């Protein structure tokens, strides 16, 4: 991406993004982030509603001429990760980091607002633009669902909604979209195995939940490889296995926690049925008792076909057809799904890796960072998507 493709306020975008990067906050705790967003909106003379779903904001720009209402979502929470990179704008909040690009998402939305204000869209455009600064996307916080439940959008006749998400698998200047399902549904599980604790040197007098749990972790991977059709995507990950207090103590209890990601309801049902079957076998084979709790997470992200055509057409016009990719679904979950259940729209994967560097650190890595020229691409693309959707003919 050349310097001629940068926005006129590239340096402002970079400074703003780095400001947000330094103050990451966890779900529903985004007080400093919300305050800084409010400051920028005040500087631009844009009204907003605050305190939506605790820390969320909704800003609105309305043109003098009537037209449709179109929305842009920007999530704003960070992750409980200690930042590993040594950059000048490193997180100042210990144990919390913007490792998923949400600092960039917020910056892009504010950049779109600045452009619309400074380039006279209010006088020349049609309709209304909503800018949704959403808390609690990470960790199952369901900030999108809570913003909808607040009632703030009940009187908003939104016709289309868009969101960009940083995507380090693609270089800056390129974007990806999925046709149909973009991101998987998520379910979270907790399995509690109870045996009989005792001395580590006397395993024959105990019922070891650690050994039983280790068998279970391996057996659950067979569900994916042997119980599902090879062309049906699914993920079953155990992310936490906790047991014991000492090296020579067989504990009474082991707790396994994990996530299931699926694109199809039947596949999900098969996984849950097989997990329950494995637990029954584990009880019989190892003598433990078990408790299985499943919590539904985010629904799948489903892109609207008409909005997808809109994105493809305008992204190709801006970036060139060779830089716009129709890709398969991703197994990561995204609560933008709740907005797409309410309004038609598209989640856009915004390339953010420097073209001169190979892909190394993905999302949720303590070393994740992105080429800040992606901010300019995001601003230009979102301006085009929002302003082009001002009449059925133009959209």
Image: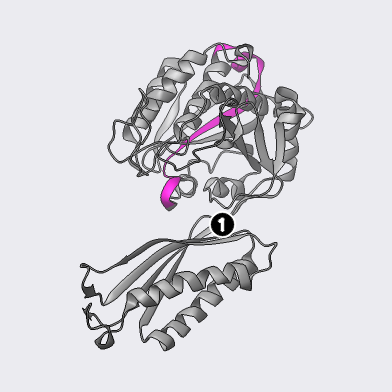
Which span of residues is magenta-colored? 118-139
Q: Is residue 126 visible?
A: yes
Residue 241: which quarter of the image?
Answer: bottom left
Query: Can you say which quadrant of the picture contains the N terminus?
Result: top right
Percent x, y of residue 52: 41, 40
Percent x, y of residue 380: 62, 22
Q: Nearer the viewer, residue 39 or 262?
A: 262
Percent x, y of residue 38: 39, 25
Q: Is residue 352 above or below residue 180?
A: above
Q: Does residue 379 show up magenta in the picture?
A: no
Badge count: 1
The residue that label 1 is drawn on is 185
Query: Can you say which quadrant of the picture contains the C terminus?
Result: top right
Residue 239: which quarter of the image?
Answer: bottom left
| Residue 354 relative to residue 175: left or right | left
Q: Does residue 133 show up magenta in the picture?
A: yes
Most extreme residue toward the right is 393
Residue in the picture at 32% in, 34% down: 31
**Which secondary structure lies at badge 1?**
strand
| Residue 195 relative to residue 283: left or right | left
| Residue 125 relative to residue 392: left or right | left
Percent x, y of residue 211: 36, 76
Q: Is residue 112 above or below residue 290?
A: above
Q: Is residue 395 visible?
A: no
Q: Is residue 260 above or below residue 151?
A: below
């Amino acid at each position: 991406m050349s310097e001629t493709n940068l926005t006129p306020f590239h340096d402002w975008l970079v400074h703003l993004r780095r400001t947000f990067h330094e103050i990451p906050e966890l779900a529903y705790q985004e007080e400093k982030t919300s305050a800084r967003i409010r400051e920028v909106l005040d500087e631009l003379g844009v009204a907003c509603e605050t305190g939506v779903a605790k820390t969320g904001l909704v800003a609105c720009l309305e043109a003098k001429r009537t037209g449709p209402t179109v929305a842009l979502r920007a999530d704003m929470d960070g992750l409980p990760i200690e930042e590993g990179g040594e950059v000048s704008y490193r997180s100042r909040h210990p144990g919390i980091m913007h490792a998923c690009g949400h600092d960039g998402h917020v910056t892009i939305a504010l950049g779109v607002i600045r452009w619309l204000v400074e380039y006279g869209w209010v006088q020349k455009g049609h309709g209304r633009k909503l800018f949704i600064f959403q808390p609690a996307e990470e960790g199952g916080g369901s900030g999108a669902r809570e913003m909808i439940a607040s009632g703030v959008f009940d009187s908003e006749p939104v016709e289309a909604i868009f969101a960009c998400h940083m995507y380090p698998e693609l270089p800056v200047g390129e974007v990806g979209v999925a046709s149909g399902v973009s991101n998987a549904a998520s379910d979270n599980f907790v399995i509690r195995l109870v045996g009989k604790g005792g001395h580590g040197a006397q395993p024959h007098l105990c019922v070891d939940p650690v050994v039983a749990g280790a068998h279970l972790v391996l057996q659950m991977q067979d569900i994916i490889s042997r119980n599902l059709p090879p062309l049906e995507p699914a993920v079953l990950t155990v992310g936490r296995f906790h047991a014991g207090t000492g090296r020579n103590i067989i504990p009474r209890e082991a707790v396994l926690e994990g996530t299931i990601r699926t694109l199809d309801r039947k596949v999900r049902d098969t996984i849950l049925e097989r997990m329950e079957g494995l637990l029954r076998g584990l009880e019989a084979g190892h003598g433990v008792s078990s408790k299985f709790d499943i919590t539904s997470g985010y629904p799948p992200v489903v892109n609207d076909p008409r909005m997808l055509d809109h994105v493809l057409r305008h992204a190709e016009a801006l970036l060139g057809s060779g830089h716009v990719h129709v890709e398969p679904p991703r197994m990561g979950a995204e609560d933008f799904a709740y907005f797409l259940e309410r309004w038609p729209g598209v989640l856009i994967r915004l390339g953010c890796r420097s073209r001169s560097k190979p892909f190394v650190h993905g999302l949720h890595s303590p070393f994740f960072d992105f080429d800040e020229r992606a901010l300019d691409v995001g601003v230009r693309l979102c301006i085009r998507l929002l302003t082009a959707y001002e009449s059925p003919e133009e959209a």
